[in-house]
Image (cartoon, coloured by chain):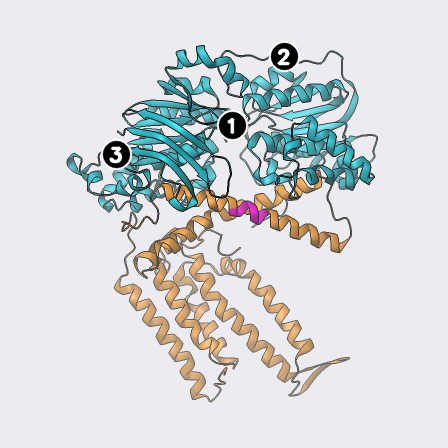
Amino acid sequence: MILAAHPVADPSAPLARRNPVAKLAAALLFSLPLVATLDPLTPAIALAIELAVVPLFGVRYSTLARRAWPVLIASLGLLVTMVLFSATRTGTPLLDLGPFDVTTGVLISALGLVLRLFAVAIPGVLVFATTDPTDLADALVQNAKASPRFAIGALAAFRLLPLLGQEWQMLTLARRARGIDAGRNPLAAARLFVSTAFAMLVGALRRGGRLAVAMDARGFDSGLPRSYARRQIFRPADTALVVGALALSSLTLGITITLGLFRSII
Amino acid sequence: MSTVVLRGFGWRHAGRKAWAVRDVDLRIEHGERVLLLGPSGAGKSTLLAALAGLLPDDSGEQAGTIEIDGLDPRNARVGAATDAWFSGRRGEPGQRGVGIVFQDPQTQLVMARSGDDVAFGLENRGVPPAQIWPWVSDALDRVGFSYPITRSTAALSGGEAQRLALAGVLALRPGLLLLDEPTANLDPAGATLVRESLERSRDDATMILVEHRVAEALPLIDRVVVLEPGGGVRADGGPEMVFAAYGDRLADEGVWVPGFTIPPLKSATPATPDLVRAEQVTVAQRLAPVSLSVGAGEVLAVTGPNGAGKSTLALLLGGLLAPTGGRIHGFDDERPPHKWRAATLTGRIGSVFQNPEHQFVTSRVADELAVGPRRLGRSPAEVARTVEKLLERLRLSKLAGANPYTLSGGEARRLSVATALATAPRLLVLDEPTFGQDRRTWIELVTLLATLRDDGHGIVAVTHDDDFVQALADRTFPLGTVQPKQPLPRRRRS
């Protein structure tokens, strides 16, 4: 779970210290060109820039790799699917695997997609690896004018997430104690999974309800203006980060267009 | 400091026929410390929710009036942040508004860091930032919270978390402090922590406490109010007076009145050969190696401090968890219990979890009892007979059609024990069976377990409850060595 993990960065790194809202905005702006074009060059340039700024966030490459492993698995799946099932098999045949012709065309489009996946995911991983969830909620409320009902409410719900893992384990054991197991029957296993998930959901809703009452009792969302115990300030350096991200993303797009490789997604 | 006045107050939750509480006339002067008692179902929690302003107009029907310092509680809560609240000297608030502490610490803490959690209520009331942190450390001092404000709330024990929840409420300087069984979800050590905090932090706020365990509550209170289940107030006055006049009746109804002991029910015959034997079993980071055996016709109590691995041992003996070292065997089976098929397991060993709701798998009480026997392949007539018998034996007949999730704590406990009995296992493993139960359910459980033992069942109970050990245990197995609590081993995480 990428989101539930604690920040792992060196908090004094120049970009890790930036306002969470600025980091989030920069990540979004930087990813924009990646969803605008289908060519493989744009994500390649973006990825290069991303990997170059990683040290500025105080994140080690090994930590990044550990955090990004779900992306790695997804990209492998993507690669295999593309190679096996791609409809357009243009270019030079490289390998003949019976019904599957692996051609240069197939490989290039597969590679483009994998690069894109990484280029879009890494900014997100970087932001959450360097941001404390409490700081993010504070900044969303104070600097992005998000409603506290949403931001603080989500933060509180977030705190209950790790409980779900324990809950799942207890429910699974309790079902076995009741004489319910699936054995080797996949259908029974699926049914058991659904019923356990349902019980966990019911429990989560009840806990969520109790938490909401407790928050209510402490005056949350009572219509009064809130004050802030922890101040989040949007500094000129934060603006610079956002502007920088925008400039870099324009640069990436500019290079692609100049080289005539831009392929609009629409 | 607040004055509470109820005149003919009643509340009926939307969609219910019966009134949760009604005809309550009560006046509580400022600074009074009241223990609110009554058998389960008398409406204590509803009354507290009403006082806390947590019953919106559209969630039910109200009779009579309820006033805190002349205000409707629904307004007293919000109004607490208005000018009156800041009118005290030197910018300090006068004690105004209502604060409430609930049972479960897990669902009261909002923030990831302890200090932030105390600050949460102050932020909601718009306290100026410069004042927030001094007030936070003041509240933490008052409850005796000994960690730095950056301490993760997830790393706190139940008792410490409940202390923090209390600090979060006290930081708001309520004129009326409501406590809804604040120690019911805690082990004895945690409960002591919270009671110490309550004694430490006592000031001139009016306090209303709901608590089953009267002896522990007595040092905190100076007045007792007993609610009558049908409506109205049965008794009201000093503790000595109320318990002298109504002690027997309250004890019969399930209140833990001091001075009413229960005669022990020990086994008359020695235990017969072992049902299950564990040799040097261990679970990495949860349980140090232990060896023990349980025979038919005995009650074995597993005791010990938190983190000693009592619940883990119960899961091992229940055949639900694989040991990481050592071995368990029993019932003349070559395979260890955790490798048996679930249906085989329930025919031999029944497990009762600490939280009954974890074990419910259907939406009707009667269906719940039928699950086990059906899995064992019993005939429909036989299943019906078993269900019928158990409903009667555990006083659940009237609830046969009810949804298990809607039962009260005592009813849910009885049902979870009944589900384990439905498959007639020789060995019963119970995790904190008497936890949070009222006196009446407690006596029923102890009597039932004694009968089962005398019928030749083996019983293992993990428990913190000294009274339970005194009354029932034939043998005690104390687990020592406190270890840091780790999640159950399943997957290694980097």
Query: What residue would you read off at disc 1?
Result: B40
- Identify the element where label 3 is drawn: loop
Please report, as a chain letter, where disc 2 is located. Answer: B
Query: What residue would you read off at disc 2?
Result: B264
Mark 3 or 2: the one toward you: 3
Location of residue B70 in the rendering, given as x and y in whole percent from the top left corner: 25, 34
Which residue is pictured at 33% across the width and 24% down the height? B200
Query: Is there any visible trace of residue A161 in the rendered image?
Result: yes
Chain appearing in orange on the rendered image? A
Location of residue B475 in the rendering, given as x and y in whole percent from the top left corner: 67, 17
User: Is the residue A221 above or below the residue B211 in the image?
Assistant: below
Mark 1 or 3: the one toward you: 3
Residue span colored magenta: A200-205
- What is the three-letter code of the residue carrying label 3? Gly
Mark 1 or mark 3, which has the lower sequence index? Answer: 1
Give the alpha-carbon distance from disc 3 to disc 2, as whole Å. 51 Å
- What is the three-letter code of the residue carrying label 2? Pro
Q: Hey, which quadrant is residue B264 in on the image?
A: top right
Please report, as a chain letter, where disc 1 is located. Answer: B
Query: Is there any visible trace of residue B280 in the rendered image?
Result: no
Q: CB atoms at circles 1 and 3 under 8 Å apart? A: no
Of residues A226 and A117, which is closer to you in this image?
A226
- Identify the element where label 2 is drawn: loop
Query: What residue would you read off at disc 3?
Result: B70
Residue reaching furthest to the left = B90
Give the alpha-carbon distance from disc 2 to disc 1, as whole Å. 25 Å
Mark 2 or mark 1, which has the lower sequence index? Answer: 1
Q: Main secondary structure of the magenta part?
A: helix
Q: Hey, which quadrant is residue B231 in on the image?
A: top left
Of residues B408 and A231, which is closer to you in this image?
B408
